[in-house]
Image: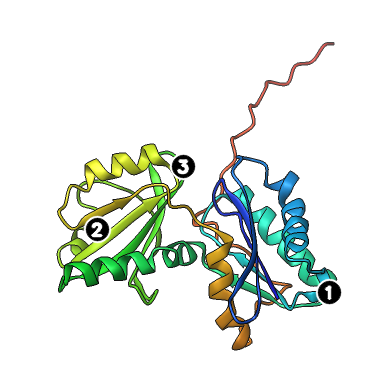
Amino acid sequence: MILSIESSIHICSVALHDTEGNLLALHELHEQRKQAERLTLLVEAVLKTAQAKFSDLKAIAVGSGAGSYTGLRIGVSTAKGLCTGLDIPLIGIPSLKAWAASLRSLAKDLKNQTQDKNEYLLCPLMDARRMEVFTAIFDTDLNYVLNETALVIDENSFKKELASNKILFFGDNEEKLQKCKALINHENAIFISEKLSSAREVGKLAIEKYKNQEFEDLAYFEPNYGKEFYTTAKKQFPITSNQ
């Protein structure tokens, strides 16, 4: 069995698959800033649902980013801790790719229904600070058409890709998604609401890596945060002397 963790956005999810790719259990937490408190409980709940034990696990898969600094740090730390304790391998799956995988079937169905000559591409828009998003574009085989990047969406975004392709856009911030919809006012742009990333797809993509023995180095593996993490600078107070 392969246990999968996805914590790159505000939703935290844990899934369990057998090594043939069948989903055995899935638990998700739809509360912000609760990963640190609840992630281990989700892991235990998934194993209990599937009537499985930690000793049954063959590998741990984790969404490796881009995404939330805190969420990724907690998810990857938990995954690495489990791998170390159980002496099993770690599999890293790009979070944006796993998210895109959840809409592959829809993109293929739309192309078949419309008999459109254009390709249908997949573009997750993951909320980042201010007006930025973490994004990438994939074809339905999950090959990169546009590599992962952090950018501010404007009316010229994805102009080249939209010229000859239909693109399905989806995101984890509905307000920002609607603003992107207004900016990307193109006949080839299709916006999908309420489709969030999940450990379900992380697990599915991990199966092939497991069979090919494509594992991460536990000592050096770190999540892809998408860009440098900034903290708020501490205020500096003048030093006074009472003499």
Q: Which of 243 and 211 is in front in this view?
A: 211
Left or right: residue 97 compared with residue 209: left
> Is 24 drawn above or below residue 132 in the view shown?
below
Mark 1 and mark 2 lie on one chain; the one further toward the N terminus is 1
Mark 3 and mark 2 lie on one chain; the one further toward the N terminus is 3
Quadrant containing the C terminus is top right
Q: Which of 43 and 87 is in front in this view?
A: 43
> Is 54 drawn above or below residue 190 in the view shown?
below
Left or right: residue 234 compared with residue 181: right
Name the residue rendered at 43%, 52% in the picture: 195
| Circle 2 Cα neighbour tier, 10 Å, few/some/many (<14 / 14–19 / ≥20) | some
The residues bearing labels 3 and 1 have C-alpha atoms spaced at a distance of: 40 Å
Quadrant containing the N terminus is bottom right
Residue type for callout 2: Phe
Name the residue rendered at 57%, 48% in the picture: 11
Residue type for callout 1: Ser
The residues bearing labels 1 and 2 have C-alpha atoms spaced at a distance of: 46 Å
Query: Do tag 3 and tag 1 residues touch (Cβ < 8 Å)?
Result: no
- The residue labelled by disc 3 is 129
> Is 217 drawn above or below residue 33 in the view shown?
below
- The residue labelled by disc 1 is 55
The single residue placed furthest to the bottom in the displayed view is: 212
**Image position, residue 211 (x, y; %):** 61, 87
The residues bearing labels 3 and 2 have C-alpha atoms spaced at a distance of: 20 Å
In the rendered view, how is the structure colored? rainbow
Mark 3 and mark 1 lie on one chain; the one further toward the N terminus is 1
Tell me the number on the disc at residue 158.
2
Tell me the number on the disc at residue 229.
none
Q: Which of 125 and 130 is in front in this view?
A: 125
